[in-house]
Image (cartoon, rainbow, N blue to C red):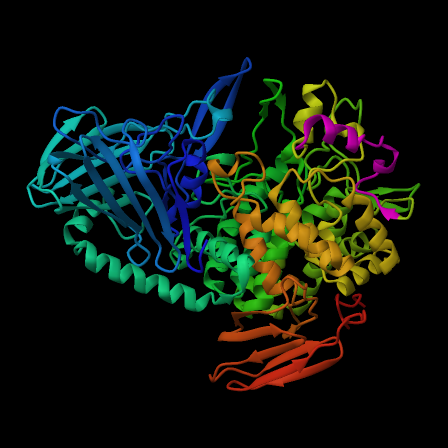
Amino acid sequence: MTGWTWEYEGYAPADARLRESLCTLGNGYFATRGALAECAADDVHYPGTYVAGCYNRLTSRVAGRRVENEDMVNLPNWLPLRFRVPGGLWLSPDTTPVLGHRERLHLSTGVLERLTRYGLGEGRVLVVRQQRIVHMAAPHLAALRTEFTAEGPVGPLEIEAALDGGVTNAGVPRYRELDGRHLTHVHTGAAGPGTAWLRCRTRTSDIRVGLAARLTADTPATIHQEPARVVQRTRVDLAPGSTVTVDKTVALHTSRDPAISDPLHAAVDRVRRAPGFDELLASHRAAWARLWRRAELDVPGEAGRILRLHLFHVLQTLSPHTADLDVGVPARGLHGEAYRGHVFWDELFVLPYLNLHFPEVSRALLHYRHRRLERACTAARDAGRRGAMYPWQSGSDGREEAQQLHLNPLSGRWLPDHSHLQHHVGSAIAYNVWQYCEASGDTEFLHTKGAEMLLQIARFWADAATWDDTLRRYRIRGVVGPDEYHDAYPGAPGPGLDDNAYTNVTAAWVLCHTLEVLRTLPEPRRRELAERTGLDESELDLWEDVSRALHVPFHRGVISQFEGYGELAELDWHGYRQRYGDIRRLDRILESEGDTVNRYQASKQADVLMLGYLFPPAELQTLFRRLGHRLDEDTWRRTVDHYLHRTSHGSTLSGLVHGWVLARARRAEAWEFCQEALRGDIADVQGGTTGEGIHLGAMAGTLDLVQRGLTGLDTRSGALWLDPVPLPELSSYTFALRYQGHWGVRLRLEHGHLEIAVPSSDCSPIDIRLPDRSVCLQPGESSRLLLADDWPYRPHPAALPARRA
């Protein structure tokens, strides 16, 4: 790592897929993994290309059952460019001696550069230098420049560039029993002497795909059609010490694109009109420079370098181009096929960062959820519920895409999957609606689409809650919380848990805040919404009651993860660590032994502690008080301690949440977990999963950790609230944000001081609220505030709306 460069030295087949994920290039519309252009897909390499929102559904027979899965499609491979001495093998690091190899990812410009020295024998060396871009300004274009240099008498070189439509989805070994042949009707041809094309379509979703490639070299290329491939071939002469340059420019369109009539025609036309590589590179670099200005983040040291890489991948997956698309947040980015490209609750960790930099992207991602609101309402009706039941995994149309079976690679067994019971995804969507509107000031969205989603999610929770005469409380039964390891009670005939604390508390939050939104809607809009949804006052009275009387279980002075959690057995953590070392995937270990995590007080990831991630301490206390519980600091610290020692961290999100929570509860231990979150993908801490795609939620979450977590930044009630808890390892840094029309509000935390600068504009002043003071900054003003060493806890006033009269 250097400041703006991510570099790998030497060729390491065992690390190839990890490198390919972390060297992926994209622009929010499509992305291509960082595989070498001369390497085909095999057990070492996997050159995948993915267009945001491009899915296809297939049915497979697995473990004696017909299983339907929808996947983000691996589209035709535009990368192939191979070379050889006439009569010899095609050169690649797996077939030819490699005398030197370096890959360098330039974060500031979005350029992937590689330099390889191939030994050809008898003192002959071929030096290959490539620069690759997936264009950030023109999102349908990509380009590859290859420079061949001869050291010694190399002589002629045969070069072959291709578009390959014979690809499948085969990037995740666990899925290989599933049908991965998503493309059909592959046709190829030529569009003039220098341009080749390929068209195909997806098998069931019938998305038409068009690619066109232009090859530019000193000698003209010939075009050849092969089964599912189109190839451009040329031959160049390499004198000793000379360099020959070959440029490959590619355009990609699908029938989901707006303002086109045919994707193939659009691709051919675009690639014909595309300028040369140098001009493309210049406009690409300029587009990246604009992005970096809007997402300014200056954190010193190794943490800063990793954060910059994380930001780079967030921007490649969710760029301003995303604002024009009907897509959600793919949990593994556009970087691989893990989770089949589905949309989970990971947006809960992504949108809070985007809200304060690219609110137009956040709005588009929420539009994705709103367009699928009708489907969520249909799912609720089918389950006998009112309101909207959003799916745990979403894809093209918003139906539940959670798998029915999952493979335990340790035992080789296919097991039932009950993750679709994680209905808390609805609360995550509601939380993101609220956070986006508070940060952006977008009352139009809040009063229209946002209010509709909030209303239907609140309606679902109120209907899901049942009254218990014994407890004198409402209960939500048969769910799964964020800890996916617990999906049933030991020995129970069916799945589901009762009164998951995270689910119930967030449901109360949704009900409370939806009531507040409905109270503040303009009267004509409220009447219109009530008429369209059949909302009446008696329903609002029920919401009020449920929001105050949902059951939150406790055991031995700590919040219980779910009802009955405290009665489960304790796991021999020391013994399992001694036997297995890495026990992150405790579920697989225990199942392979014929046991189950359901028997133990053991969690995959933060569950109860997610409440401390979502809500500042004062708001969480107020929320519990609304539910009739006193959550003092001692109770919360005991709760943190309890789960800290009973979590295996089988998710990259776990270290992030624990670091965030410990920064306020037990600061001395926070940095260990922050480091775990920072290194989750670059060190592949989950044991090979990064090669299947990066963990976008964890990457964005680390950015939000320094933006909101350690600064205590909260956008609420028309003000910026700040309550800093700087860690010694992250006590000085700078970032800029966009807040309610103010572009480039700059905050710097350094040596016990907080500096805030508001750029000149015609916007209203910004109210800054700290625990012990308030500051109002006019546009063009700045302020330097002295921070106390340890902030005393002071409840924020009006942390939650007051009770309706």
Direction front: furthest residue: 123
The quadrant holding residue 42 is top left
The quadrant holding residue 630 is bottom right
Q: Residue at x 93, y 41 (%)?
A: 470
Which of 125 and 481 lies nearest the eye of the viewer? 125
Q: Count the marks: how many?
A: 0
Work out which quarter of the rendered image holds the C terminus and state it. Answer: bottom right
Residue 571 x %, y %: 81, 31
Residue 443 x %, y %: 56, 69
Q: Residue at x 75, y 65 (%)?
A: 800
Which of 235 and 151 lies nearest the eye of the viewer? 151
Is residue 597 something one can see in this rendering?
A: yes
The quadrant holding residue 63 is top right
Which of 232 and 777 lies nearest the eye of the viewer? 232
Query: Image check: 790 left or right of 392?
Result: right
Q: Is residue 573 magenta?
A: yes
- Tell me where the magenta segment starts and ends, as one range: 558-582
Residue 171 drawn above or below residue 551: above
Residue 561 x %, y %: 79, 42
Query: Image check: 470 left or right of 107?
Result: right
Query: Image check: 337 left or right of 432?
Result: left
